[in-house]
Amino acid sequence: MATINNGDNKRYRGLIISIALFLSLIGALLVFTFYTSSLLERNTVLIDQTNQVANSAQSVIKDLFDLDSSYGEDTSSPHIQRVLERLEQNTALINNTLTAIGEGGTITDDADGKTYKLPSVSGSAQENVQAANEQWQLLEPRIETYLKDADNVLVDSSDDLTQAVEQAKTSSLLMNESLDDLTNEVFDDAERQANTIRLIQALGVVAIFAYFLIFVFFFVRRLRETDAEAFAARRETQEIMETVNTGLFLLDKDLNIGQQHSRALNSIVGSDRLAGENFTNVLRGRISDKDLKTTQQFIEQLYNPRVKEKLVDSLNPLHKVMLHNSSDDKGLNNRFLDFKFSRVYEDKDIARILVNVNDVSDAVYLEQRLEKERSQNDMQIEMLTTILNVNPKIINEFISNTQAHIERMNNILKNPGSSQYELEGKLNAIYREMHSLKGEASALKLHSFTKIASEAEDKLHALQNQGQLSGNDFLQLAVHLDDLLSLSNTIATLGERINRSAPPKAATANTQAPLSDSALKDGVAKTAAVNSQPASSISTDGGLDIDLDDESNDDRLSFYNEFAKEIAARQGKHVQLKSTTLAQTHIPEHLAKPIKEISIQLLRNAVVHGIETPGVRHSAGKPEVGTIDLEVQDNGSDFILVVQDDGQGIDYDSIRNKLSKEGRFSEEEASQLSQGDLLKQLFSSGFSTKENADEDGGRGVGLDIIKAQVKDYNGKLNVNSELGQMTRFVITLPKA
């Protein structure tokens, strides 16, 4: 519980003292009233007791006269006994009362049984008491003498009675006079005291009332001053709240927004009713449920005094958070808001949390634009680097192939297709085109192309696993195609600008811009290649011909041949590409594109699936650097491509296990498959022996692309492999 601070104590000190003094005056008046009431009561009792003594004295005299007139009667008679008893009681009462009145003693009232403390008398009252007591001292011994033998029939008490009666005749008159004077004195004294008390009480009431009026006057004046100060403070606070451009409000432990908040908060948050609302209800539906839950936990930690504020502030989940538009107006954009939380203390206790909200949408959108421009600049630099360092023929081929891939994908997308078989075929065809485009871009280290193509592949892969397909599922791919076409046009434009600005004959084979189509044709080498070995010497013994009649799904893109080392680096491997015929053999123009695409896929497959990691190769007694041989040969009628690696070879048992695991075949069916059947499945779309797909492989598209290319050109595909030693692919494509 919060306590009043020192400032508040000083502020209310005068008020507290005034109230204490006022209460003290009232208390003093009450004490005085209680005292005077007790005094008046004692005076009343004193008057009653003096009257009682007078009455008792009269009763004594009356009883003595009665006994005297009845002398001779039987002392045991009820009458005589009653008189004697009354005489004895009155005698004792007079003795006690006179003593109590004279000395201020305690007396018990026989009527109500209460005990009273009589005040001592003084002055003339004391003289009257003494006079009455003197007369009683003359009478009382004679009564005592008579009463000692009054009921004894054997003793003659007539003389004692006569003496008592005679003394009573004298003493009673004097006692009555003294007691009457005493009563009058006591009454007069009590009346004087009562008048004094009434005067004092009246003066006290007047003083208290006057003090109360003064207190009220100053209190009201102070209250007005305090109200004026509070009003001025509230007005200043209101002016600040109405003027400040940020959202300000307080949060309690229950996450309720305070009644006071800045006017800007309504427009920033986009709500007209915030005061008293729960903060979570304001945010619910406008941020993610995860962020909402994290926000609740974050504020709970802010109220935890054991947690340092700077430490918990670094965990703020509402830093530049997107607040979704809650209005029905779809024209309003979502906002980016930055919430800052600060503790508000009362003494050492955390009372509330002050929240400062700023609309940082412009800053965030600016950052996004800058980031986009930065990415575009990086992309252009990447493209310029590629243009300046790659043979212009290769650049032109890439541009031409990219546009051809995009055109074919567009044509495939335009194909309506209705049945699941048609839609699956449509999906597989697009997947192959995208994978091939990605492989060529990756070979040229055009990461912008590769990133867009990879994102498209992710969506294609998701569609493959979706099961049921519809025509609308392909609409999302149009955006990626537009982006790819835009990048292709950009690289072509950059090449043309460089070509125009370059001085004549200044360009080298590695630095000149892309050439025109006519220049490409003129630049093709006309010399026949000399092969390291004749085509007839290439043996297919021990290899297996692949059945190319099966149509299946795609795998992932592969890479350009010079990019083999980059693929190996990502895979944690070391490779060395060797070729003795590639630079010496002329590739027919109509086969240049398929040979290029097939080579990229085979090289990627060799690095990803064939070559082992350095540790595995060392354990097997192999050099840590794997070797890939790429050879081409022209035998006159056919063009032959050979890609061989010294890797782990094809593990047919692993293929069987993977087929049964994916549910393509049962374990029994998989065990009965021949090596040819297993290789056929290896070339099927969507199948890969790689457990986890990554950028370089594992989706089962690369070999499917090779199969499709070979089929399109009526070629042949031969695979030979030795487990733990090597794998060789021989592609034969007719030249005619």
Image (cartoon, rainbow, N blue to C red):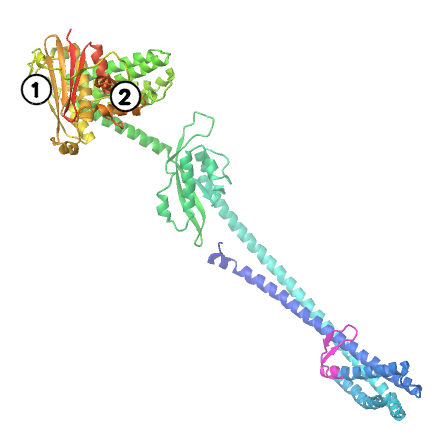
Task: Please indicate whether residue 49 sits to the left or right of residue 234 in the image.
Answer: right
Quadrant location of residue 17?
bottom right
Position of residue 193 in the picture relative to residue 269 (left or right): right
Q: Which residue position is annotated with label 1?
A: 580
Residue 553, image x, y percentages: 28, 17
How far from the left and from the top, in percent, is residue 397? 18, 15
Magenta stretch in the rendered image: 98-123
Secondary element under disc 2, as helix, strand or loop, is helix
Q: Earlier in the sequence, mark 1 or mark 2?
A: 1
Which amino acid type is shown beneath numbered disc 1? Thr
In the picture, the quarter occupied by the C terminus is top left
Horizontally, is 341 left or right of 651 in the view? right
Residue identifier under label 2: 670
Up-down relation of residue 342 to residue 220 (above or below): above
Tell me if 270 is positioned left or right of 413 in this view.
right
Q: Residue at x 42, y 31 (%)?
A: 324
